[in-house]
Image (cartoon, helix red, strand yellow):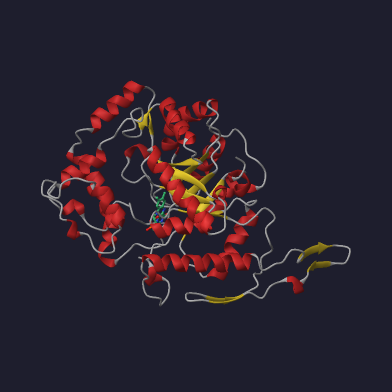
Amino acid sequence: MTGLQHFGWFLARGFGPQGWGYPSLDWDYDWTRPEVYQEAARTLEQAGFDLVIIEDAPSLGSAETIDLRVRHAFGGPKHDPLLLAPYLFQATRHLGIVPTVNPAATLPYTAARQFSTLQHLSGHRLGLNVVTDTGSARHFSAEPQLDHDAAYDRAEEWLDGIRSLWRSWDDGALLTDRETDVYADGSRLRAVRHRGPHFSFDGPLNAIPFTDGEPAIVSPGGSGRGLGFAGANSDVQLALAPLTETSVRAYRAKIHDAARAAGRVPEDVQILFAIQPVITPSADEADRIVAASADPDDATLVQIARKQSSDLETDLTALDLDAPLDPSIFGAHVSRGSIQRLVGDRDEDAPLRAHLTALARAGRMSDRSGFVGTAEEFADLIEELGDWGNDGVLLWGDFHPVTLHRTLDELVPVLRRRGVLRREYVDGGLRANLRAF
Ligand SMILES: Cc1cc2nc3c(=O)[nH]c(=O)nc-3n(C[C@H](O)[C@H](O)[C@H](O)COP(=O)(O)O)c2cc1C
């Protein structure tokens, strides 16, 4: 029997010019101002979502590919989501706000203090999406660019360090006793002396302890090392995997094994599978969208090529659409997973057009070939996921009233009626709501 599931929204283009290139989003919002994000956050809270995750990359990438990233605003500019968070907290009362953070970019003491401040300011609603992108190393310190697994080692050292600082006030250290006029007992503060491979710092932290738990840790890494990190450290794991029973169960088992290996229990990690649905008013309309996508025109392919060029740091728009795609054009630093998502399992001599067409093609939710469908069909999918033990889903898209209303207006009442979407929040902030069911 399916029960309530957790719903998150991933602002996939980060705190940047998210509407660029989409005429339907040309509503004269200024992306540098908080209003469009505040309005979206209120809508998601009204809908009963647990949390919003704001994508980020702290860098425009390598000098050779900067133009690819900024030309159509797919890879930048990006402003700092940590500094957007207070505006979203102020606009909402229950919603968890989760900026993406990179351990390379902020020293543990500064990070522990900033996160602690936001956790208190927000009524314990802060989460941190911890990513290990290494391409931005040159901006931050003299440390050379780490390899993939070493970046995870650094992330664990960073997080352990932050937690030791958050825990540097023992129980009973904060007294706030008006009778004796004693605010805090300094003898109960731990010195914390950390000397590690990547960071060195002393404590204690000069921020007071939490009343409703530490900020929730969220992670999106899909590699073996990434899943291990999630099992050991995360409260929420963002999963990008096929939504078949075998794949969902296998993914969950890997995280749960990693949690047990780290002395935790599977219930400590909520796994949210990422989905980008296109919700239609009728099944006929869904069929029409799918049929129309089968044979995309060149303008559509070029738009997809632009986005891929930014993600893959390689200018696909300069290539002949009808010539085979040579995989050696991608540099060694480009994510293997992203290349795989482009080329799929098509023949080596398949032209670029075939790869882009495959990305343009949409499938129907009803036969599980894609994510175009009605609210009822979406609810069927969510219930099926729930039958496999799933904790929740992460809807994926920009953070604009047009997108949110298109997706949510029909969906929310149906999900509520089916009993899979919460009607109310509990007190205690993000952690309490993640653990409420
Ligand atoms: C839902 C989702 C969200 C992600 N968000 C980010 C992000 O905001 N910033 C980023 O650099 N990488 C993001 N990633 C990509 C990678 O997971 C991330 O770079 C990771 O640290 C690399 O780890 P991996 O090799 O274990 O996948 C995201 C991935 C997924 C599936």
Q: Nearer the viewer, residue 22 or 178?
A: 178
Q: How many marks?
A: 0
* Left or right: 45 in relation to 191: left
Residue 303, position in %: x, y?
Answer: 25, 44
Residue 368, position in %: x, y?
Answer: 34, 32
| 140 shown above or below 395 | below
Residue 83 showing in the rendered view: no
Q: Which residue is located at x 42 percent, y 47 percent?
A: 251
Q: Nearer the viewer, residue 344 or 277?
A: 344
Q: Which residue is located at x 28 percent, y 67 percent?
A: 63
Q: Which residue is located at x 44 percent, y 59 percent?
A: 131
Residue 129, position in %: x, y?
Answer: 48, 55
Furthest toward the right, the residue is 179
Using the rendered view, name the quadrant where residue 115 is placed: bottom right
* Left or right: 28 in relation to 370: right
Using the rendered view, name the quadrant where residue 193 is placed: bottom right
Determine the quadrant in which ligand 1 lies: bottom left
The quadrant in which the C terminus is found is: top right
Residue 19 showing in the rendered view: yes
| 115 shown above or below 73 | below
| 43 shown above or below 224 | above
Using the rendered view, name the quadrant where residue 207 is placed: bottom right
Residue 58, position in %: x, y?
Answer: 41, 62
